[in-house]
């Protein structure tokens, strides 16, 4: 599964880790995150993330 990077603050969403602070279990692909999920660091939406190169 691909990692995704927030273009605003540089936070990297790693599917193997998930986002436990926001109830996202490890193994959750970026595409499977809820539509209302936001960057845990800066609060922008999924549309501000790009696949990690």
Image: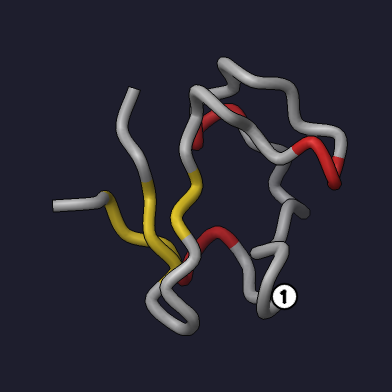
Residue 33 placement (x, y as % from top left): 64, 36
Q: Is residue 48 above or below residue 50?
A: below
Residue 5 placement (x, y as % from top left): 38, 60
Which quarter of the rendered picture does the N terminus lie within? Answer: top left
Q: Is residue 16 above or below residue 8?
A: above
* Position of residue 18 in the picture relative to residue 40 (left or right): left
Quadrant housing residue 24? top right
Is the residue marked by circle 1 packed among few (<14), some (14-19), or many (20+) residues within 10 Å? few
* Position of residue 10 in the picture relative to residue 52 (left or right): right
Quadrant housing residue 42? bottom right
* Residue depicted at x 59% and y 22%: 28
* Residue depicted at x 79% and y 36%: 20
Q: Is residue 9 above or below residue 2?
A: below
* Residue depicted at x 55% and y 59%: 46
Nearest the eye: 28 or 21: 21
Q: How many marks?
A: 1
Judged from the image, the secondary structure of the residue bearing numbered disc 1 is loop
Residue sitting at the far top: 27
Q: Which residue corresponds to mark 1?
A: 43
* Residue depicted at x 47% and y 38%: 14
* Position of residue 3 in the picture relative to residue 47 (left or right): left
Colour scheme in use: secondary structure
């Amino acid at each position: 599964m691909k990692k995704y990077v927030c273009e605003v603050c540089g936070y990297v969403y790693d599917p193997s880790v998930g986002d436990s602070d926001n109830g996202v279990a490890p193994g959750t692909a970026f595409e499977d995150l809820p539509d209302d999920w936001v960057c845990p660091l800066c609060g922008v939406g999924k549309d501000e993330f790009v696949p990690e190169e």
